[in-house]
Image (cartoon, coloured by chain):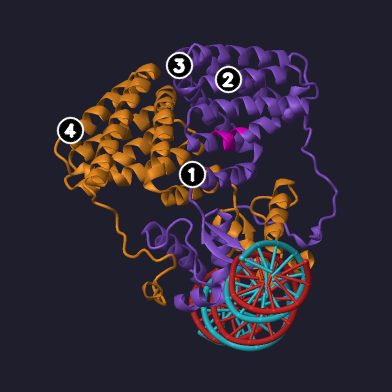
Chain colours: A orange, B purple, C cyan, D red
Amino acid sequence: MSVTDSTIVKIRDLIMSGQIKPGDRLPPEQELALSMGISRSSLREAVKALSQAKVLDVRRGDGTYVTSLEPQLLLSGLSFVIDLMEDRTLADIFEVRRLLEPSSTALAAQRITDVQLEALRASMVSMREAHDPEELVIRDMDFHAQIAEATGNTSLCSILDAISSRAVRARVWRASMVGMKTMTLSAHQLILEALTDRDPALAHAAATVHVSESERWLNEHLAMRKNQGKSPVRSNIHNQIDRTQIEPGVES
Amino acid sequence: MSVTDSTIVKIRDLIMSGQIKPGDRLPPEQELALSMGISRSSLREAVKALSQAKVLDVRRGDGTYVTSLEPQLLLSGLSFVIDLMEDRTLADIFEVRRLLEPSSTALAAQRITDVQLEALRASMVSMREAHDPEELVIRDMDFHAQIAEATGNTSLCSILDAISSRAVRARVWRASMVGMKTMTLSAHQLILEALTDRDPALAHAAATVHVSESERWLNEHLAMRKNQGKSPVRSNIHNQIDRTQIEPGVES
DNA sequence: ACTAACACAGAGGTCCGATGTTTGATGCAT
DNA sequence: ATGCATCAAACATCGGACCTCTGTGTTAGT
């Protein structure tokens, strides 16, 4: 195991053991590297990995701090890896959503407040008024996110968001289809009514129908795309990167 | 945005766009850094972050490769962050498990094979014969993992594993209690019977009872610990970091 | 012709020192 | 009291040097 990897573990253990707490500031890179017996470069690699995982927060010109370690923060990296999954393996993620969303909606039915219900109705109105597919998808996503929030469970929110974002994005090219908007709207209407009645069982059922419906549509379209041979962008088959495509980027 | 961060995004985009595929080998650090217009140090930080996220696989003396990007690989980092969550915020994770496990068990009831059923029975036998709490917990974890596997959904497996591992570990000090073993065993027996009958509804119910039972026990114990003011283990192990060098942060 | 030991080239691992940038704090002038 | 200039501290980035490990081609021995 490299010094960098062991340093990652070491810092993690320092946090888990309570020797460093959320919000604490780490010693300067120089000192920390010295006290850990490694070079600054190696330490920086470890810190970069941990800050990417939202465990550390590096503030330039100030110092390196332990983040709040709140679930929504730590789980925000989940969508990063899910976005990297291949389409082939994505069906499993959708299935997880199909398993999780109904129960979540049922839970929301037990905990949703009147204010949140009102916001949900407003969300539906603005979705009805949405015109372009892009906005429609955003409203759709917002609707589900609001229900997740109504459970009061931030971890659940983050997880649902991560496993839904990919599905939602894939829904863009589906949203433009005729009947899609009305279908989604009526499904949402059913869910909203169940939530209004605070009926967990009905909410569960309505969400099941909605998610399953979505999943079937998506699978049909994936199959269609596959059969039509309309393959994704495949520029070159080189085993290595085509150097010319990696430009010395000076973006942002 | 730092050079390193934009490099992370750049490499991710190269993978997402299909220009680099799973198993592909990246150009040497020197070349890659040159072609991206950054120093080798900065590139290494980016690569370290991505390899920690199981996106890249760095083989010393050989080269840097894109991993298989399989869900179970990408999601294996999930337990890393969940382990870092504070006890205070962990109840939400358990609730997610309570929402997800019953549906998963129901799904397993529809898909479990005879071979897997037999393995499950064997698992129960070895749990009955287990003596020390440590082994009991392992068998318990194994039982649930096998059910997750029976769904045939590797993503679901990984997620359940990540959100259960912490709960399972916390169960160690609970497993030694009288009645715990028999309680768990009878609950498992119920689940096993439902799976044997391929009865999704019953499997769902049995899993719900089991998980809720576990969650209640855990919460009671957490509350007890809190009231007793029995603080977590705080070892005096003098790690390589000097305690005095870590200044308490300024919490807002 | 085959096998095993060797040598080499290439790739990542680690470290160092220097310099640029940003931030927060200090102190002075208004 | 306010605002600005200044400064020190801390992170950002770089380039190079040297080490270690790995894969592979080569060669000596069988």
**In x, y percent, where is residue C26?**
67, 76
Question: Residue B71 bears which disc, if any?
Answer: 1
Task: Give, as a three-letter code, the residue at label 4.
Answer: Thr
Residue ID for mark 4 = A182
Secondary structure mostly seen in magenta is helix
Question: On screen, B78 above or below B43?
Answer: above
Q: Secondary structure at mark 1?
A: helix
Residue ID for mark 2 = B212
Q: Secondary structure at mark 4?
A: helix
Do dots 4 and 1 share one subunit?
no
Q: Is residue B162 magenta?
A: yes
Camera-nearest label, 3 or 2: 3
Task: Give, as a three-letter code, the residue at label 1.
Answer: Pro
CB atoms of marks 3 and 1 within 8 Å: no
Q: Residue drawn at (49%, 48%), measured in percent from left and top? A: A76
Q: CA distance from mark 4 to mark 1?
A: 34 Å
Do dots 3 and 2 share one subunit?
yes
Residue ID for mark 3 = B200
